[in-house]
Amino acid sequence: QLPSWDLKLQVFCDVVRYHSQLRFPECSDDDIDTIDFDQMHRGFQSQPMPPTELSAKVGVYRGFAIDADAQAIDPHTLDELGLAEQPLRALIEQDARCPRQIPCELVASWTACAAHNIRRDSHKAALEPVPLANSEKIVLCLHGGAYVMGSPASHRETLGKFSACTGLRCLAIDYRLAPRHPFPAQFHDALLAFYYLVAQGFQPKNILLLGDSAGGHLCVGLVMLLKHIAQSTGSQLRPGAVMLLSPMPGLLLDGDSLRTQAMFDYVAPTPLEWPNAPMRLLYKPGHKCTDEYRKELAYPLLTPVNGDLSGFPPTIVQCGGSEVLVDDIRKLAEKLQKDNHEHVQVVYDEYPEMVHVFHRFFHRPEADAAFSRLAKFVAELKQPS
């Protein structure tokens, strides 16, 4: 236990770390032929991250679905994308043959409603995914959960607090999860959601990205993917900002904090050598961790520090000083700052003695401080240049 911790935080970390070790038991590639990855996927979904409720005092939400086949992606815009090009093309073709929907939720706090003169007793308009004003900013939210768990429901309460702090509405998508849906299915869904918001009338510059943990990794990958498409089409697709909360930095991790902070954080480190590690479940589950496999994990969409991160919009990165990923998150933030220092601001905030996605511990003053900083970051975006 760290000096600033209260009993609630201590017990949460101990309990979740214990269950993480049960979910991801030690194994090796010698066991790979005995692992039923589809059964593993069903197990994750049968014991999901618990849903949270949005208090009626905070705001309202509505669930609906996006028609994936209605969002046209030109396969030619993926030319020379590298490792993800052919799998993404295959996913686009699959949607054309077998239409599907992407479940999502729109969260609107009363603060966001008031910003558009919408009363509580007539809030239906706030739950329609169309701009309430030409300049309205909306947040596309990509949830965390190691790419194997999580949903809009698990993050509903957090997004309600974020919406209340910033006055922005939030669209959270239920993207496909590994191992049944490996990389790049999640990137495909995130791209479709971005295109959906554009088709609904939101300008790309008014779409902000928010992601925690794996969702933060997905946000970074989405910006890289949008930059690639924009370069091939000459279009303007850069989102207005990126907000990363304890982002998963990549699939290749080597920070000392994986070892030094393991006694504090509730995230139990899973070595790459384990075939049930989340990074192995995301990319080619069931494949052995050969030298060639490791080289593929260095692909920039999987490990962004290996790519060109220039051209990002204003970005804020927040993390806890006592989380196992902190060293690798610092490297990601430094790379973002280095590649964008001449053009946009990249903010890095580290909160001492806090753990992974500490924002969800609403009773903690550090969570309040982090949400206040996010609100300030968003407010500065609204100021005319």
Image (spheres, helix red, strand yellow):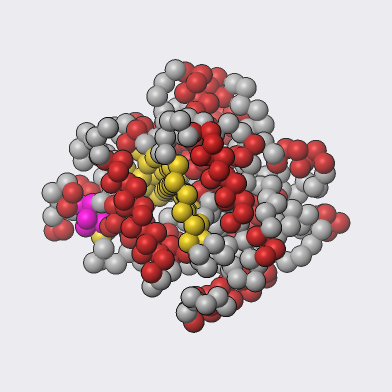
* Residue furthest out toward the front: 342
Name the residue nearer the viewer: 295 or 109.
Answer: 295
Q: In this view, does 212 lie above or below 67?
A: below
Relative image position of residue 16 (x, y in whole percent): 58, 72
Relative image position of residue 227 (x, y in whole percent): 49, 28
Name the residue nearer the viewer: 199 or 334.
Answer: 334
Classified by dominant secondary structure, the portion drawn in magenta counts as: helix
Relative image position of residue 226 (x, y in whole percent): 48, 30
Relative image position of residue 344 (x, y in whole percent): 42, 35
Looking at the image, how many numbered discs can be counted on the residues? 0
Name the residue nearer the viewer: 285 or 202.
Answer: 202
- Residue 111 falls in which quadrant of the image? bottom left
Q: Is residue 178 above or below residue 130?
A: below
Q: In percent of the image, x 13 and y 49: which residue is there?
A: 117
Q: In this view, does 146 lie above or below 380?
A: below
Identify the image quadrant of the C terminus.
top left
Identify the image quadrant of the N terminus.
bottom right
Q: Does the magenta stretch include residue 378?
A: no
- Residue 17 falls in which quadrant of the image? bottom right
Q: Can residue 96 be seen in this view?
A: no
Q: In percent of the image, x 81 and y 47: which residue is there?
A: 288
Q: In percent of the image, x 54 and y 62: which residue is there?
A: 321
Per the rendered image, the range of residues in magenta is: 108-113
In this rendering, position of residue 293 left or right of residue 117: right
Q: In percent of the image, x 53 and y 22: which residue is there?
A: 77
Q: Is residue 228 visible?
A: yes
* Residue furthest out toward the bottom: 7
* Residue furthest out toward the right: 30
Name the residue nearer the viewer: 349 or 88.
Answer: 349
